[in-house]
Image (cartoon, rainbow, N blue to C red):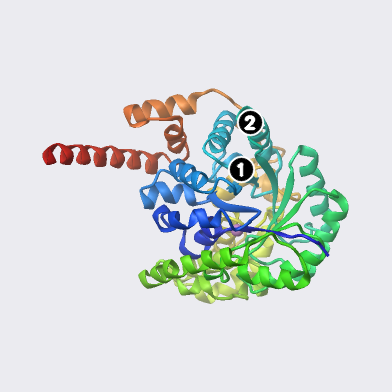
Amino acid sequence: MAKKVMITETVLRDANQSLMATRLPYADFADILSTMDKAGYYSVECWGGATFDSCLRYLGEDPWERLRNIKKAMPNTKTQMLLRGQNLLGYKHYHDDVVEKFVELSIKNGIDIIRIFDALNDFRNLETALAAVKKYSKQYQRHVIASGCISYTQSPVHTVEKYVEMCKKLVEMGFETLCLKDMAGTMSPYEAEHLIKGIKAAVGNVPVILHTHCTTGMAYMTITKAIEAGVDVIDCATSCFSNGTSQPATETMYYALNQYGIDCGLDESTINKVNDYFKPIKQKYIDQGTINPKSMQTDSQALVYKVPGGMLSNMIANLKDMNAMDKFDEALKEIPEVRKDLGYPPLVTPLSQMVGNQAVTNVLVGERYKNISNEVKNYFKGDYGIAPAPVNQELQDKILGAGNQPVDCRIEDSKRTGKDFADAKEALGELARSEEDIMSYICYPKQAKEFFEKRKANEENIATYTIEQI
Ligand code: CO
């Protein structure tokens, strides 16, 4: 068993994203940051994922300013973000120069750890971001950690050996730490034990991190087994923002680890203060209906049907819309078939929707792949990267034409034309005040532009008001 296990606190990002659709404004947590800075976390996950989009779209906040403020208030704690490799914070592939600039600006604005993953575990999609972390870490003279992250899933091809190979590859590529990301919370204690043992035996001293969710109710058991097998860092959320679709509770894990004699470096009174601070905030969002009680429950259906909870509720909603709930069982049985034909992609957004919708279509039409969604066609064309296992050849031929191969998305991504920046500058004109503004626009054009327009209008209002006052 490990002698030391460190804890990443996720309340500002994943817990916020999982329980309340990332609607937590900066003002709600600004006052606790200096306390969190004294807690002794391995890191605080506070940026990336959906926070960026939510800041612009719903909260009227500049995401870069949020990051700068967090870092300023937590100078002694590593600030961590989640980055979807070549997709940055969304689902489309960006050109390499955009990815490089995004990483540079993240480092410049205060990020210390960038956890990089790809939905298909196509590691070519991590290369540009990784190289940029190394480059700008040096340039800004800050040690920024690139953490290589694997999207965890179960399938006949996803064996312990395959995951060990993936980890070796990530280390070879130059990642400093490794993370297993179990976004659906379907990793069992048994699987965690064998995976972590296998990985630790293969990669030696490279720190291994486990990220899971309590969705199915297994997370505490899974984490305990992972700790016994030698995991180095676990992701937890302050207890009032834990459980349900979020992470296991920080204080609870602290208590349990303490009894084992495992040091996790946390200060007990500080982590309790953090929880006390967030309690009324959570209550406020329950009262407002922002936190759906459903997200706080345990949902073991994902284990029965082997599909993530979100995908299941999405499918039920679709079938209800079409008055076809009688086809539910059939559609469920169709999911593993579609997934197999697609080469067993991890069921994470957007692939979970893609597989779920195609399964529903196959069942409703009554014939497999008579109608094929554009998303599935694009998947076969190679738009998302390489499938984890060989795809159904017959289906590929049907979509691409016999003998045709998928395109290599990396060729398109690697173009450094500067055009994305030039277009953004032109579209924004004087609304853009910084490189960060330009980047926000490249990532979320509509939301960013609206945000900049409001920002300008607010300032004009304030200016008029001030003059009238004088
Ligand atoms: Co997560």
Q: Quadrant of ligand 1?
A: bottom right
The residue nearer to you, when weighing 252 against 73, is 73
Mark 2, other Cα within 10 Å: few <14 / some 14–19 / many ≥20:
few
Going by the image, does 167 lie left or right of 7? right
**Tag of residue 141:** 2
At 49% from the left edge and 69% from the top edge, which residue is drawn? Answer: 276
Going by the image, does 309 lie left or right of 321? right
Q: Is residue 71 above or below residue 423?
A: below
Image quadrant where residue 449 sits: top left
- Return the disc, 2 or 1, that comes first in the chain's sequence: 1
Residue 321 in view here: yes
**Tag of residue 112:** 1
Identify residue type, mark 1.
Asp
Image quadrant where residue 353 sits: bottom right
**Tag of residue 144:** none
Q: Quadrant of the C terminus?
A: top left
Q: Quadrant of the N terminus?
A: bottom right
